[in-house]
Image (cartoon, grey):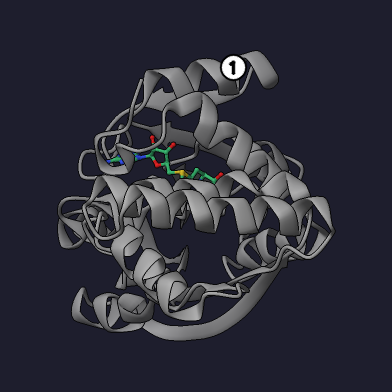
Amino acid sequence: MTDTHTAYIDTGTLVRQLDAAEAVPAAARLRARSYQLLRLPPDATVVDVGCGTARAVTELAGYAVHAIGVDLDPAMLAAARRRFPGIDVRAADAAELPLGDGQANGYRADKVYHLLPDPEAALAEARRVLAPGGRITLLGQDWDTLVIDSDQPELTRRIVHARADTLPHPRIARAYRNLLLDAGFHDIDIEVHTLVFTDPAMLPMPVGHATAAHQAGAITRDEADNWISEQTRRAHDNRLLVAIPMFLVAATR
Ligand SMILES: C[S@@+](CC[C@H](N)C(=O)[O-])C[C@H]1O[C@@H](n2cnc3c(N)ncnc32)[C@H](O)[C@@H]1O
């Protein structure tokens, strides 16, 4: 399936990109920090919304909690079940979760809210499923301030901004805190962690950005090809650099 909001990427490509990004030790530390900020009590129930291939669902289950994954994409859920047979993953929309009122002690959404048509509705749904005192963590990239090293900085800026503009909410991560306050959450923790990628395995990400920028009409085919050649050369010469600011915001219901 092709996600309507990441129309430039099919599910298989997205899975490969997520696998490459989540493999770096700093990404694993960031996930662990997101679990810590949930302050889960023993025997907690936690829901990971937009769970993808359920990496976090499986890791959370290791904290002796009941972890439920929810995702809209059946192909993602099929991949999750193949990887982790027996996990509890459910097909549903973030705005209509398959949980009862107050059933969850923790709610997590990682790299998801920029895709949602109505983030406020998803937060209202988070409040519904969370028990009083339950915790929420939102984690996500700020698409406008992605850093990519290139010999063509002006073209790079255009590519980054054009790719950001293909998303429903490219700058939502910097607004997480205010959205949570507006939705009635309190006791907010806010952190920004920069993930740095230099492995050639991450090359498909800048290539995808240039392709998206071209398809959006922001750059010419020649500009895209030229920039992709430079990034490919950099990957080959171990000179790739992509840095992504990740907002991690937690709050209490
Ligand atoms: C970029 S992926 C992140 C996956 C996972 N959270 C991770 O960090 O690896 C975004 C996920 O959100 C899911 N998604 C998008 N819109 C959704 C919605 N309205 N409700 C539930 N899931 C959604 C997509 O299918 C996809 O699996």
Where is residue 160 drawn, in percent x and y?
Answer: 40, 67
Q: Nearer the viewer, residue 88 or 17?
A: 17
Q: Is residue 135 left or right of residue 158?
A: right
Q: Nearer the viewer, residue 43 or 196?
A: 196
Instruction: Identify which amino acid the numbered label 1 is placed on.
Output: Arg
User: 1 above or below 58?
Assistant: above
Residue at horizontal 30%, vertical 79%? 175
Total of numbered circles in the picture?
1
Judging by the rendered image, the residue that carries numbered circle 1 is 81
Where is residue 95 drawn, in percent x and y?
Answer: 21, 45
Q: Nearer the viewer, residue 157 or 201?
A: 157
**Residue located farthest toward the front when viewing the structure as drawn:** 222
Where is residue 166 drawn, in percent x and y?
Answer: 25, 54
Answer with the quadrant where ligand 1 appears in the image. top left
User: 54 above or below 12?
Assistant: below
Residue at horizontal 64%, vertical 13%? 82
